[in-house]
Amino acid sequence: MAEEVKKIMFTVRKAPHGSIYVYEGLEVKLIMAAYDADISVVFMDDGVFAVKQGQDTKPLGIKGFEATYGALVDYEITKVFVDRQSMEERGMTEEDLLVIGEDEDTEEPIKPQVVGSDEIAAMMAEQHNILSF
Amino acid sequence: MLHTVNKSPFQNTTLESCIRFVRPGDVILLLEDGVLAAQAGSAKSALLEEAMGKCEIYALEADLKARALKELVPGVKTTDYSGFVDLVEQHTTHSWL
Amino acid sequence: MKLAVCIYEGPYNHEAADSAYNFIQAAIQKGHEIKGIFFYHDGVYNVTKLMEPPQDDRHIANRWSAIGASGIDIVVCIAAAKRRGIVDEVLVPNVRISGLGQLTMMAIEADRLVVFGD
């Protein structure tokens, strides 16, 4: 009997650009996506700023990652969630979220799913392991 | 779930966020600067008093001792690294970094 | 139980390396199998032999090296290391540089993964 695929969650709670955690954390997600694991990503607290659209890091002179986040679905990372309360507390709405890919059939843009804390807590409880960035 | 918190509640809101996602039966372990939340009678002790309604709260002894914290919020349990390992054995862990 | 540990912060600057070390020592004493220790972000600075702390303080790199000598796999992330000028030549013995695939395997194969960082 085949072993069950392990659920691995990434929580992103740090703000982007002020430190490298979000950037290097994204590198881990892209590598892990190539393995046989059931990956999910949750943006909460200041991490919600990592999925805000329109980030321009050129004036800073640093390599941004908005384009890579825009291709998460291409990497088969489709379980992407944003904590509603974190988003609202920071004056963001669903319209502010960046697109992470498009639907294969309809070509409709896909955005992270906005969910409540109870739902996230329930998902956390189902994980094999959780990595935080 | 075991939730580890290593941030002072006087400096950021990590502990508050953690408590928002805690489910009944979960455990919070305070370590490093996180143990500052365990000080009795502080402006932040209500956070733990409220959380205790739904989960167990531990503070790491070595970190308490290093910071001379002796009077703890009633109900907060202490543990050593061996107890930390036991908690990890019993629960999947999320580090609230 | 199979445990894995990931460390994000450099030595001395942050308590993460000490917490992780004390946790691992306790886990070994209790008879758990340490599947691996992975250094990421500034954590890659933990295992450079160039560090020379005062004699009356702990030597963090040598401490990790001793754990590695006991047969525990200690991995430094190659991408994070390259960015920070950490190469094979500066590493203490009993640790190795490898890719994020190693962290992936630890996350999948270990029963528990514990992250220490800031």
Image (tube, rainbow, N blue to C red):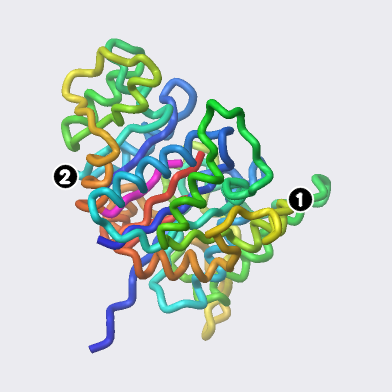
Residue pictured at 74% horizontal, 53% vertical? C85
Label 2 in the same subunit as label 1: no
Cβ atoms under marks 2 and 1 closer than 8 Å: no
- Amino acid type at circle 2 is Gly
B79 sits to left or right of A29 = left
Chain letter of disc 1? A
Q: Check residue A57 in the rendering and tell me which mark sits there, or answer none.
A: 1
User: What amino acid is found at the position of numbered circle 1 in the picture?
Assistant: Thr
Neighbourhood count class around disc 1 (C-alpha, 10 Å): few under 14, some 14–19, many 20 upward: few
Q: CA distance from mark 2 to mark 1?
A: 43 Å
Q: Position of residue A73 (x, y in %)?
A: 54, 73
Magenta stretch in the rendered image: B92-97
Residue A13 x/y as whole percent: 49, 45
Of residues B49 and C117, the one nearer the viewer is: C117
Q: Residue at x 33, y 16 (%)?
A: B69
Q: Is residue B95 magenta?
A: yes
Q: Residue at x 34, y 20 (%)?
A: B65
Measuring from the top left, give residue C20's x and y in whole percent: 42, 44
Is residue A127 visible in the rendered structure shown here?
A: no
Mark 2 belongs to chain: B
Answer above or below: position of B3 versus B73. below
Q: Residues within 10 Å of mark 2 (few under 14, many from 20)?
A: few
Q: Which residue is mark 2?
A: B25
